[in-house]
Image (cartoon, rainbow, N blue to C red):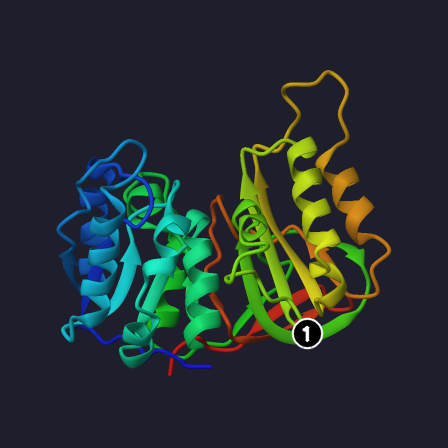
Amino acid sequence: MIYPKRLTPGDTVGVIAPASPPDLHFLHKSVPFLNELGLHVKIAPHVSSTYGYLAGRDEDRLQDLHMMFADREVKAVICAGGGFGTSRIVDSIDFSLIKKNPKVFWGYSDITYLHTAIRQKTGLVTFHGPMLSSDIGKDNFDSFSKSMFTQLFQPTLLHYTESISPLRVIAEGEATGRLVGGNLSLLVNSIGSSYEIDTKNRLLLIEDTGEEPYRLDSFFSQLKLAGKFEEAAGVVVGDFNEAAPKKREKSLSLQEVLDHYFLDLDIPVLSGFKIGHCLPHYAVPLGSKAALSSVSRSLSIQPGVS
């Protein structure tokens, strides 16, 4: 794996919108937070562009991504928001450019597709964490979530225990492996492509938002039939925001769906991690070595920067 260099005060970070148009009001409100970290901010030319539900045409969003990785002044690339559309540009990404210019890459939600593609094509460790217009620029962005950015300035061993949130053991065990995954619907979207998520001997992180149990059931079924759970060393179940049934009077609960797919696995599966579309938002490096234990009810993750 390639570990990006740690940031230092005075560095410049580049902001891109590779998916949907960000809320520019909240985007600009987020900039002072980055300044408080000692960082200068460079916003890509097409961040304010719109093309339907996309932040500009595919070639524009791709150009911004390439520009920020090629820019020697930029030490980190932070996504303004998620939404839709990263899978539209992934086949045109110059992965050799990214591999020659490894740097911090940060985002979540639809950015999951880019996390998976970049890691599997280049070996770069990337970061699943809160974004500018979606989270940081809003008044309810909390101090704990803000503190997760310190891992970019100093190699930090992350240790998630029940001191952060209650964790539920779905399947018992202890396992180690590189942490991979992210947004569940985007992981399913990768199946059958050359960017299909590789879970073999890895700890699989899953999270999502706004999906009812019947939809999550179909996503889990697809991953199971593709062998992704059988190959995994363990499963880290993050936050599933707004997963309550709405369209149907009769429904399985989210917990019943989780139990159906994970209860009988011979690998550790724990749920309740505040990772995903939630606050606090626990940011993690994808591609770093990690350890999951039902005994200590914990997830430990090695540093994501060098």
Res. 37 image quadrant? bottom left
Residue type, label 1: Asn
Where residue 117 appears, as percent x and y from the top left, is 45, 64
Q: Residue furthest top?
A: 249
Residue that appears at 70% across and 18% down: 248
Would residue 275 be visible to someone looking at this image? Answer: yes
Relative height, residue 115 to residue 5 (above, below): above
Q: Where's the C terminus, which quadrant?
A: bottom left
Q: Secondary structure at mark 1?
A: loop
Would residue 167 be visible to someone looking at this image? Answer: no
16 on left or right of 169: left
7 on left or right of 242: left
Relative height, residue 105 to residue 251 (above, below): below
Res. 199 image quadrant? bottom right
Question: Disc 1 marks which residue?
Answer: 201
Residue that appears at 67% across and 76% down: 176
Res. 119 image quadrant? bottom left
Residue that appears at 76% across and 72% down: 174
Residue that appears at 44% across and 72% down: 121
Where residue 8 appears, as percent x and y from the top left, is 23, 76
Where residue 203 appears, as percent x and y from the top left, is 64, 67
Relative height, residue 20 to residue 112 (above, below): above
